[in-house]
Amino acid sequence: MHLTSAIGILLFCMLVDKSSSWKLSNFRWVKSDNGELLCGTSPPNKTESVLSRVHCVSSCNLGCSSTCQAVNYWKNTNLCELFYYMPCSYDVRQDCANYQVVDNLPVVSFVTFEI
């Protein structure tokens, strides 16, 4: 009962909040001609601590007030750098990988189910 109520409240808040744009994004990492992962060296718009690479990439969809275009994920420090633009410069950095949004697909409906 409590889980159903919580899900209902969450869906209500998501539908009422017109300022959020819910999109699904596909990402690709940036590699050099030699196949090495590259890190964006342009200044990020926002930096935050994350639990994992998946959390970093998903925060690109949920954490930005503007359209997120790319993220740097720093593995050893679990830092996520969010870019509202495509970084202009890249370099090979140990423990860092840049992921860019390939496309944004608008979410047009919610699927509900009972547990």
Image: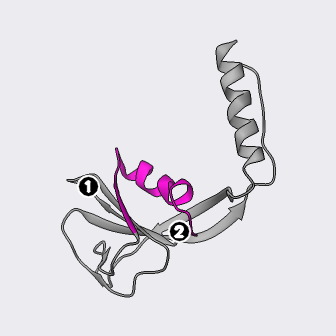
Q: Is residue 101 left or right of residue 71?
A: right
The image position of residue 86, as x and y in percent, is 46, 80
- The crowd level at tag 2 (other Cα within 10 Å; few <14, some 14-19, many 20+) is many
Q: Is residue 85 left or right of residue 91?
A: right
Reading the chain from its start, which is encountered first: label 1 or label 2?
2
Mark linked to residue 75: 1
Residue depicted at 71% across the width and 21% down the height: 5
Q: Amino acid at mark 2?
A: Cys
Q: Nearer the viewer, mark 1 or mark 2?
A: 2
Mark linked to residue 68: 2
Q: Quadrant of residue 56?
A: bottom left
Q: Is residue 10 left or right of residue 101?
A: right
The image position of residue 98, as x and y in percent, is 37, 70
The image position of residue 80, as x and y in percent, is 35, 59
Magenta span has 54? yes
Q: Quadrant of residue 12?
A: top right
Q: Quadrant of residue 30?
A: bottom left
Q: CA distance from mark 1 to mark 2?
A: 20 Å
Magenta span has 27? no
Coloring scheme of the render? one colour
Q: Nearer the viewer, residue 9 or 74?
A: 9
Secondary structure, mark 2, is: loop
Residue depicted at 76% across the width and 21% down the height: 114
**What span is colored magenta in the figure?**
46-67
Total marks in image: 2
